[in-house]
Image: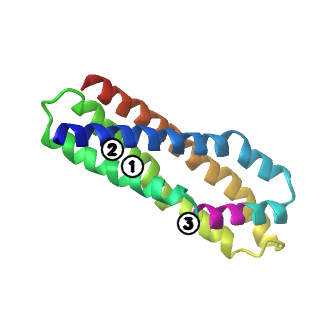
Amino acid sequence: MLQMLITGLLWFCAIGCGLLAGLYFAFSTFIMTALGRIGQASGIAAMNAINVTIVQSLFIPIFLGTTAASAALVVTALLRWSEPGAMAMLTGGVIYVLGMFVVTMVFNVPLNNALAAADPGSQEAASLWARYLTDWTRWNHVRTVASTAACALFIAAIAAR
């Protein structure tokens, strides 16, 4: 029974990481570039609308559920270290929690909050928007790589089991 639960968590995490990696990849490769090409006020308004909408969507349960399940897999791997796939499970969980969740909370969310508080037409917003496009995207690249790597490691753990 416990083996089935662990396997189920691994599949859930692999799928969740894959979904989020795809979302972050889209932002890193073309969405942020497109937002940077439209006018500052329009770009800020669009990003603020995305940030409001995303937390009201299915994104949040997948974001939080995958994070919680990944943390549970870290603990499981430590407790079941001698089992096949434990190293991949541990590494995937650590990379995901630190590289996706912690980066989001420490870097991307504060940038989102600063953008939401800015007056889109002000001179202050112009420098904020320029920094936002660069800094937010840089940290989003980290989330993309972390989510992709964790997905691969969770699949490796499944294969090893």
Contact, mark 1 vs mark 3 (Cβ under 8 Å) = no
Q: Residue furthest right?
A: 39
Residue 53 sits inside the magenta stretch: yes
Question: How far is the residue under mark 1 from the one under mark 3?
Answer: 16 Å
Q: What residue type is disc 1 on?
A: Leu
Residue lying at 24% horizontally and 43% vertically, measured from the top left: 5
Residue 133 image offset from top left, x and y in percent: 70, 53
The quadrant where residue 30 appears: top right
Where disc 2 sits, the SS reads helix
Residue picked out by circle 2: 94
Residue identified by numbered label 1: 98
- Mark 3 neighbour density, 10 Å: few (under 14) some (14–19) many (20 or more): few
Dominant secondary structure of the magenta stretch? helix
Three-letter residue code for mark 3: Pro
Asked if the residue at tag 1 contacts the one at tag 2, i.e. Cβ–Cβ closer than 8 Å, the answer is: yes
- Residue at 40 percent across and 50 percent down: it is 66
The magenta span reads 47-55
Mark 2, Cα crowd under 10 Å, few <14 / some 14-19 / many 20+, is some
Label 3: which residue? Answer: 110
Q: At x 47% / y 61%, what residue is drawn? A: 105
The residue positioned 79% from the left and 65% from the top of the image is 126
